[in-house]
Image (cartoon, rainbow, N blue to C red):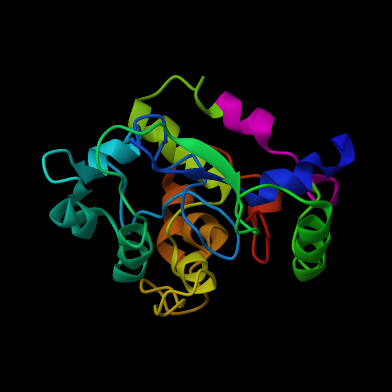
Amino acid sequence: MISARPLVHKGLIKRVGSGSSISVWYDPWISDSRPRSAICKGINYYPHLMVNQLINSQTSTWNLPLLHQLFESTEIARITGITIATGYRKDTCGWLFTKSGRYTVKSGYRVLQELADEDVIPVFGPDVRRLQAQSWKVKCTTKLQHFIWQIISGCLSVGARLCSRGMRVDPLCVRCGMGDETINHMLFECPPARQAWALSPIPTPTVLSYGCTFL
């Protein structure tokens, strides 16, 4: 059972009750090919936003003006597809890939086969949890700490990532048009970014040169 924990974690989704214990940006509450957190369409000015803050408490409906401010239309469709309970109900956890919400060996095996080409078991890729924890210890503003966390986690809303999530956007970098807008391209390869690094007093390691696959 211990060896199955990484796989179980991939299918673990937080079900919205009141939404007060679910982080919009950090907890897996959106149903996609696998559970995930929400993706902001621009700069995230609300790093500590909870799901209940997206809900109109008087009408028990989603706050559409706020949703349109924060998310792309495809993301809004996923969010508004989540039923909001009338009256108080606790947030719960479940397994996305069964109707009952409970993990079974059969469903786990099926998901493992379907996600065979993805990084289902952490051993196949680097564990960034320590770096994620360190990002909150950097001596800077909370917004910048959150930005660093997003970089490490690979969850910035760049074109390539939005496209991989099924959103109808052009993955090409809008600044230079020389490549897909990945996090790595945005930070290190795009000419404006390279110029910023060149003018910065911070030395740039050779590993961040052309063709780097940082993210």
Q: Which range is magenta?
A: 122-134
Instruction: Decide if residue 25 is on the left or right side of residue 118.
Output: left
**Residue 179 sits above or below residue 151 on the image:** below
**Residue 139 sits above or below residue 63 on the image:** above
Screen quadrant of the C terminus: bottom right
**Residue 197 sits above or below residue 173 on the image:** above
Is 133 contained in the magenta span? yes
What kind of secondary structure does the magenta stretch mostly adopt? Answer: helix
One can see residue 126 in this view: no
**Residue 171 sits above or below residue 67 on the image:** below
Screen quadrant of the N terminus: top right
Is 171 contained in the magenta span? no
Instruction: Decide if residue 69 is on the left or right side of residue 161.
Output: left
Residue 5 figure quarter: top right
What residue is at 34 percent from the left and 54 percent from the top?
Answer: 83
| Residue 95: % across, % down | 63, 49
Residue toward you, 23 or 130? 23
Instruction: Decide if residue 193 is on the left or right side of residue 41.
Output: right
One can see residue 31 in this view: yes
What residue is at 59 percent from the left and 44 percent from the top?
Answer: 94
Residue toward you, 121 or 162? 121
| Residue 143: % across, % down | 34, 33
| Residue 142: % across, % down | 36, 27
| Residue 166: % across, % down | 48, 74
